């Protein structure tokens, strides 16, 4: 299987910037405004660049009094690549896609010579992808101090920017969709520095770390999702060292299970995703079973169609964990 990239356009123009005095620049600009010259010569030498309202589009001035718009350092993605399932109103745009529709395995090209990467925040992992305090923790918590810069993991387009109070426990949240097929979530920020529909480059500062939303102290809650389904982000990055684990990432369907995490063997991950039956022994309680199998009393009751007050029978077979594939 070939690694996928959603983008089709591979347009990249670069122009070296040459310093120019302010006076000459002003003179040149007024000349261009009067003449309206738009053609450029193949042999002309670029003498300066001027910013425009679009951060990737510059006006390049040439020594023969001509100029042109040039895209500089623009990520290799285009708006058309993101048209499908694009929804800035919903935090999770793919919520209606069932897991059964996802491939068993997909190869994602995370980085190559045209597509960069950057660890969103280098730091200690305070809490990883796991079942935690009776709920699923579907992200990685990275330690930081309020105000620390948070950067985009890959080139992409900002799909969601939410203020604290509009995004549940996430607090100030940014969601970016990437050309490699992933979406990344950056939560608990103290400040946003991008807007919805902005094109961002890997490594670009998108916000500042904080402790907004459901948070007990400053940290970045970072999620990686494919087709809206989260998996352990530590499979992609080593946050302690800031390294990308590999440029090609093979995403397996069983990775979406909360009990499947980085560091397991393939067999351990598959086993973590399968239905588990518990045969009731003397002294077992629903609460103790929920704790032991990293689930909730409510979930066990749902799976077995019983209530939380049901008396367990010896040798009763209880589904304590449901497989998700
Ligand atoms: Zn978290």
Image (tube, rainbow, N blue to C red):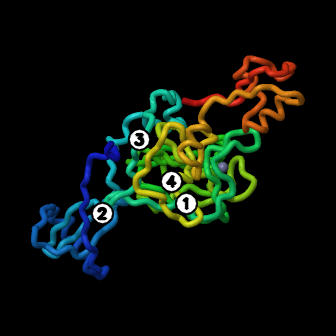
Specify which label sits upstream in the sequence, 4 or 3.
Answer: 3
The one of 315 and 186 positioned closer to us in this rendering: 315
Q: Are marks 4 and 1 in contact (CB under 8 Å)?
A: no
Q: Nearer the viewer, residue 29 or 300?
A: 300
Residue 203, visible in the rendered structure: yes
Q: Quadrant of the N terminus?
A: top left
Q: Which residue position holds label 2? A: 72
Between the C-alphas of marks 1 and 2, the distance is: 30 Å
Looking at the image, is 265 positioned above or below residue 97? Answer: below
Say which mark, if any, is on residue 236: 4
Q: Quadrant of the C terminus?
A: top right
Mark 3, Cα crowd under 10 Å, few <14 / some 14-19 / many 20+, is some
- Front residue of this view, candidates 198 and 275: 275
Reading the image, the residue beneath label 1 is 238
Residue depth check, mark 1 versus mark 2: number of the one nearer the observer: 1
Mark 3 C-beta closer than 8 Å to ligand 1 = no
Q: Could you tell me residue 205's position as x and y percent?
A: 50, 62
**Does the rendering let one see residue 223?**
no
* Residue for badge 3: 106
User: In terms of sequence position, does the residue under pointer 1 or pointer 2 come before the other?
Assistant: 2
Residue at the image point whose x is 16% and y is 75% from the top: 45
């Amino acid at each position: 299987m070939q690694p996928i990239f959603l983008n089709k356009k591979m347009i990249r123009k670069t122009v070296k910037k040459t310093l120019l005095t302010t006076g000459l620049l002003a003179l040149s600009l007024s000349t261009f405004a009067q003449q309206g010259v738009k053609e450029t010569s193949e042999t002309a030498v670029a003498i300066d660049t001027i910013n425009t309202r679009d951060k990737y589009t510059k006006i390049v001035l040439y020594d023969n009094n001509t100029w042109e718009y040039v895209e500089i350092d623009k990520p290799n993605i285009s708006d058309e690549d993101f048209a499908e399932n694009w929804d800035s109103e919903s935090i999770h745009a793919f919520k209606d896609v069932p897991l059964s529709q996802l491939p068993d395995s997909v190869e994602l090209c995370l980085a190559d010579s045209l597509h960069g990467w950057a660890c969103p925040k280098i730091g200690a992992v305070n809490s990883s992808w796991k079942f935690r305090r009776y709920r699923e923790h579907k992200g990685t918590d990275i330690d930081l101090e309020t105000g620390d810069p948070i950067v985009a993991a890959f080139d992409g387009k900002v799909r969601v920017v939410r203020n604290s109070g509009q995004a549940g426990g996430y607090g100030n949240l940014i969601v970016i969709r990437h050309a490699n097929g992933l979406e990344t979530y950056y939560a608990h920020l103290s400040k946003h520095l991008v807007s919805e529909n902005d094109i961002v480059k890997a490594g670009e500062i998108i916000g500042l770390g904080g402790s907004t939303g459901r948070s007990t102290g400053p940290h970045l809650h970072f999620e990686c999702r494919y087709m809206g389904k989260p998996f352990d982000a530590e499979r992609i990055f080593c946050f302690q060292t800031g390294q990308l684990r590999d440029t090609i990432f093979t995403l397996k369907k069983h990775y979406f299970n909360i009990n499947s995490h980085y560091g397991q063997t393939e067999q351990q991950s598959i086993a973590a995703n399968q239905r588990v039956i518990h045969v009731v022994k003397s002294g077992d309680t629903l609460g103790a079973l929920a704790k032991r199998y990293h689930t909730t009393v409510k979930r066990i009751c749902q799976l077995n169609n019983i209530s939380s007050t049901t008396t367990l029978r010896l040798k009763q077979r209880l589904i304590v964990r449901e497989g998700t594939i």
